[in-house]
Image (cartoon, grey):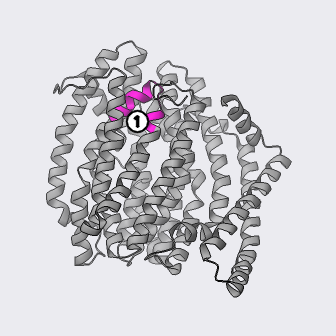
Amino acid sequence: MLRPSHAHSVFSATVVLMVSTFLSRIVGLVRVKYIVWLFGRGVEADALNGAFVLPDMISYFLVGGAASITFVTILTRYRDTGREREGERSLSVILTAMYLVLGGAILVAELVAPWYIHWWFPGFNAEKAALCVRLTRILLPAQLFFFAGGVFGAVLLVRKQFNVQAVTPLIYNLGTIAGGLLLVRRLGVSSLAIGTVAGAFLGPFLLNAVFARRAGTRYRPILDWQDEGLREWVRLSIPLIVGVSLVTADNWIIAHFASATNGAVSLMSYAKQLFTAPMAVLAQAAGAASMPFFASLWSKERHYEFAIGVADSVSRVAALGLLVSSAMAALAAPLVELIFLGGRFSSGDARECAVYFAVFSISMFLWSAQSIYSRAFFAAGNTLLPMAAGTVVTLVSLPIYAYFYRWHGAMGLAVASDVGIALQTVTVAVLLHKRRMVSLASLDYAELGRCLLAALASGAAVWVVFEWLGAMLGHLLWSHAPVPIRWVDLAVLVSGTLLWLVVTLWVLEKTGSALPRVVMTRLRRRA
């Protein structure tokens, strides 16, 4: 099961990707912790977090930010019709064409970076803006590695080989850490940007390229604008390029408004990265694992099985999202303090960051559901409708972000993020229903209701008990012995998690939920 060439089922692929994503996010949090320790919420931190925005935009608006998604659809069609050689040639054509286009765009972005930073981050002073420009220029070439790696990774995904995808994020995150450890004394915050580029080359690009070659794929520089696969890829990618989804734009919009508040770009980024750790394990892993299977069902015109599979996946991840969000919100304060407190990151910074994290956590089930719904459209080869809808939702959301920021500063941005993702999820779900691809009636509302009740009960129990007990325990320990606050936080987290688990399982059992039994049964079968 752990061999790179092993072909997975939907469930085993989901488990492997969830475990690997969990490990990757742990390493990612170590990476964030390292940045927090060194730079806190200061000038360097704001500049570094802001420096990722332009490279992300370049990637998103030129290759749709979803190279692997569109390639999975195309290569699945070639494979299912016995035309793998044609698919391999098209891969070479597309890679060659995009090397030229994306490479040219990166060169232009290197030149216009100062103007861009001044425009997108109007709240940055001259020192912070200059540093952000330098870091942006270092990070830009990494987008070439991400794109090529996404293409080679799609070759493996079509073959149901997910193990390489499980490892590449680990290497990427370790690259940033290694760059800092080796070069931070000589280069300062620039060392982290250099490490990030190195990690992108070694992980997402090189590892995928090596194993795609082992699977028989050979890249040759070919430029053929009439190639069928290139035209198909352009057709699928154009909506992703000209449109924009709030799923991606959320971070950009938050950074834009938060730049006017000193340190807010960093604190919001830290809270969002901590939030995306469990979200990626739950939503992105399940979505990535399901995508090739959805694409295969649709290409074989097994539409009923496709609809039921999507609805079941949405129901499961949304139900789990409701449960996880309750624990995250209730234990936000000790979690943030335990992970980030120290170095240049103070207790005040931790408390502010924890509030943002708790508000983000409320929307976990929505992020989980939209991840599956979006991939249902992509698997069916329809990228135009969801991205057109996503663009409309993003435009409608902009005044919402602006209003909430004026109302309550950075906290308002966290609330606006939840409102925006709710609009995005409902819109995509309704579109699938209207097109009779996935019926809203197919969702397991009874199970979702049970999980919502369990989430409310367990979250409330944890919050009430540990608001009182955590304060009392901390006072008792500090009054008798100088026990570090992180040990208090760890004790609160461990006991709070156990209490949350007990209450959750009790409510699910009393309400007749099948979720615990189904999960354990499938895990035993795989074992």
Q: Which x, y percent locates residue 49?
A: 35, 64
Q: In the rendered image, which quarter is residue 167 located in?
A: top left
Residue 160 sits inside the magenta stretch: yes
In this view, the residue farthest toward the bottom is 479
| Majority SS type along the magenta span | helix
Kind of residue at badge 1: Ile
Q: Which x, y percent locates residue 476?
A: 73, 83
Residue 190 sits inside the magenta stretch: no
Residue drawn at 16 percent across, 39 percent down = 100
Which image quarter holds the C terminus?
A: top right
Compare residues 105 and 431 and report the one nearer the observer. Answer: 105
Look at the image and give the residue range highlighted in magenta. 150-165
Residue drawn at 73 percent across, 64 percent down = 495
Q: Which residue is mark 1?
A: 69
Q: In the rendered view, does 396 fall on the left or right side of 118? A: right
- Give the structural element (helix, strand or loop) at label 1: helix
Residue drawn at 18 percent across, 66 percent down = 114
Q: In the rendered image, which quarter is residue 523 located in?
A: top right
Residue 194 vertical placement versus 465 (above, below): above
In this view, the residue farthest toward the top is 82
Residue 177 vertical placement versus 224 (above, below): below
Count of residue discs:
1
Residue 396 vertical placement versus 97 (above, below): below
Residue 238 in view: no
Residue drawn at 55 percent across, 39 percent down = 286
Pointer 1: residues within 10 angstroms few (<14), some, or many (20+)? Answer: many
Which image quarter holds the N terminus?
A: top right
In this view, the residue farthest toward the right is 510
Residue 48 in view: yes
Q: Which x, y percent locates residue 293?
A: 52, 27
